Image: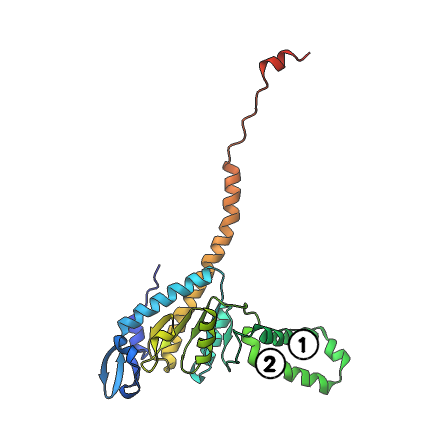
Amino acid sequence: MATDVDIKQLLESGAHFGHKASRWHPKMAPNIHSKRDGNHIIDLTKTVEGLQKALAFLTDTAAAGKQVLLVSTKRQAKDIIKSTAETTSMPYVSERWLGGMLTNQNTIGGRIKYLKDLENRMASGELAAKYNKLEVQRYEEEIEAMNQMYGGIKEMAAKPGAVLVIDVLEDINAVREAKKLGIPVVALIDTNVDPTLADYPIPCNDDATKTISLILSYVEKAILAGKARAAKSASAKPADKDKAAETKTPATPVEPPVEAVKGIG
């Protein structure tokens, strides 16, 4: 079922404001409504269309039990991305995209394993028992610094089901790594961006905080809807098996041959 997208809310959030016409990408032409004061205006009917397709895909991805990696290292979207990821229990990157986060799982996985080990040793009191206060403080600082880099992807699967990017140009390395692994990319696409970089492009303003917040509110609902569908499906399966067992026709007892009965005694 398609998610209802309110075009009026998109308008109020400034989703239609593009970049200066001189900075446009020619492939965005079908998504541009007009030009005003030297700036391009995005066709919001295209935004609604792209957003609905992206949301349906994200719901299906979450329903299949797959993760959606949320990415934005731009200042105005960092907190929103983190909040959405925490609400949906999805992995995220909001500080800096480290090369190989998707394509070099051996190195990145090793660093995350080390971080988790440090956290476990700190929580158990092992480090406090073994080292002095200054050394323990240094370990605490190391844990904090590593969580800045890897905290959002500590529980990420080796290959997420999708990557959502707020600003393709800002986080082009995330897009490239996803493409290399064949991971579908959902992205906000402004007038200065090549829309073919995303598998599910959402033509809209990728700079306005209000627009980003609105789009991510839809994303949050779509992912949660998918997870709810998955939970419902999982809980229904055992019940279906029990019901099938209850309604199963008992086997008809086999009557012994008359000759066998006569022969008894």
Disc with the residue nearer the chain's start (1 vs 2): 1
Residue under circle 1?
A: 118
| Percent coordinates x, y for residue 120 in the rendering | 68, 73
| Percent coordinates x, y for residue 152 in the rendering | 54, 75
Disc 1 to disc 2, how far (Cα)? 10 Å
Look at the picture and state if 62 lies above or below 150.
Answer: above
- How many numbered discs? 2
Viewer-proximal residue, 181 or 87? Answer: 181
User: Which residue is rendered at x = 72% and y = 85% of the image?
Assistant: 135
Please give left or right for residue 259 compared with residue 174 in the image: right
Q: Quadrant of the N terminus?
A: bottom left
* Dot 1 amino acid type: Leu
* Dot 2 amino acid type: Met
Residue under circle 2?
A: 146
Looking at the image, can residue 84 be seen? Answer: no
Find residue 15 and report its image quarter: bottom left
User: Which residue is rendered at x = 50% and y = 40% of the image?
Assistant: 244
Q: Secondary structure at mark 1?
A: helix
Marks 2 and 1: in contact by CB < 8 Å?
yes
Residue pushed farthest front? 180
Q: Quadrant of the C terminus?
A: top right
Q: Secondary structure at mark 2?
A: helix
Label 1 crowd bin: few (<14), some (14–19), many (20+), radius 10 Å: some
Look at the picture and state if 235 lies above or below 265.
Answer: below
Look at the picture and state if 250 lies above or below 197.
Answer: above
